[in-house]
Image: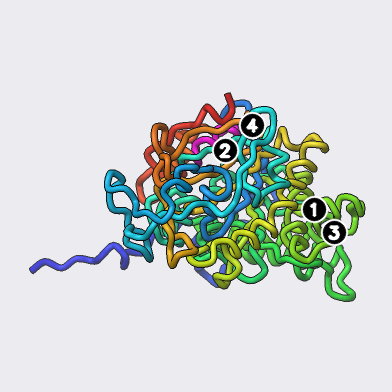
Amino acid sequence: MSSFTSPEHIRPALTRRDILVRAGHGFGALALGHLLARDGAAKMRVNPLAPKPSHFPAKAKSVIFLYMVGGPSHIDTFDPKPALKKFEGQPLPASFGKVPSQFTNGDTPLLASPWRFRQYGEAGIPVSTLYPRLAECVDDICFVRSFYTESVVHAPAMYQVHTGRILMGYPSMGSWITYGLGSESENLPAYVVMPQPEGTPEGGAPCWGAGFLPAVYQGTLLRSGPSPILDLKPPAGMTPARQRAALDLLQKMNELDTLDGDTEMAARISSYELAFRMQSRAPEAVDLSKESEATRRMYGLDQKHTADFGARCLLARRLVERGVRFVHLYSGGGPIIMQWDAHKDLVANHEKMCGHTDQPIAALLKDLKQRGLLESTLVVWGSEFGRLPMSQGGNGRDHNPHGFTMWFAGGDVKGGRTVGETDELGLRGVGDRYHMRDFHATILHLLGLEQNQLWYLHNGRNEKLTDFGGKVIEKVFT
């Protein structure tokens, strides 16, 4: 019987520099470093987040992704279904087939929307009375009503929206975009994540993780409240010169004993450098007291129910204004009472969650527009799925991944229009249905990135955000 050594027990070949580092307590590497520095050939530090050119002229240069955790009901917000009123209380017609979800079997009666819809804007786009402030902005919004995902469970569906796959471990959209374009700011993170104060979504950190991309491209969490970033002030007695000297020494020591392929250590080194630069610039960027009282009121900072989400929307505007590439802002997270997951008491749930977000989102769109930033900022609103037209427990709705609404604004998006549709009951997308691959391909396109040219070699395969390819939804911007 022949024996063999399994691949996981085979040590990778050492480079010549590795040998110098590990032999003789590293004195060989010290000598090499001295020689390289003397000859002017010392290895220069490369900023992995330096701006990179797009593949073709971009429509937008930054993204604000407004993510509604738990699944808002499309048929109660942006996709009216009058037929539900007609057939309310009746079972789903047999022609629709049996549609089980996570907690229902498809045999519960149909439930009409408790809210009225009105037409807004020049095109007469219908919006529910749940979103009266946002309805004023419909001429800048393109509603896509026929998206679908492939899981009725929150976390896998979230992963598909964030990373394109239903399994965790793949790079998030924000990571792919910062990998492809870098950042326009040297003093702030390229990719910022602002979760709900009560907690993160079910999908957790993989929703903004870098997966197999270098770790430097993962999202940077900012907290809610007056101090979004901790420890920005240097310790007492630490001058900038002393701090710079200490950082340089740490950099040299890390480079001396770090393998070239250690992306985790490279990310840590880059984070030290960024943290040092942030101490001079970030305090001003996150200081909302710099805003006028009128702006603060516009975002709802003077009202308890809108203050938190409004502050995060205002901070998102300040960040993209200063060159941050991707801002991911969550509404909902932690306990189910702070999510859009309306399995029961749909009215109380959606009136609360829309009440938190309506004024701040409208303020964000109007503020970006009046500052001339909406043209260069793509604003996206969405979730992992919608809700079923059938009831759950008589007054709630179960998960519906078969057809739901997400919308786009800014970044050359053609507002005042709807794209795609669901059937007469709002159950499934019909006609032009759009997968998350199409969602991602469209966002990449608006940023000037060709989906098939944005790839990373992983395990012998050129991995992409859109996997084997999505179709750009051209009706969004043409």
The quarter in which the C terminus is drawn is top right
What is the tally of numbered marks visible in this picture?
4
Residue holding disc 2: 143
Measure the C-alpha gap from mark 2 to mark 4: 13 Å
- Depth check: give the residue in front, 137 or 158: 137
Residue holding disc 3: 287
Which of discs 1 and 3 lies nearer the camera? The answer is: 1
**Mark sitting earlier along the chain (1/4):** 4
Disc 1 residue type (three-letter): Tyr
User: Which residue is most to the bottom?
Assistant: 236
Residue 356, located in which quarter of the rendered image?
Answer: bottom right
In this rendering, would 263 be left or right of 415? Answer: left
Measure the C-alpha gap from mark 1 to mark 4: 25 Å
Residue 261 is situated, as x and y percent measured from the top left of the image, at: 49, 56
Residue holding disc 4: 124
Residue holding disc 1: 299
Query: Which residue is at a point 50% across and 61% down the rendered structure image?
Result: 206
Query: Which residue is at a point 65% across and 29% down the rendered structure image?
Result: 412
Q: Is residue 405 above or below residue 415?
A: below
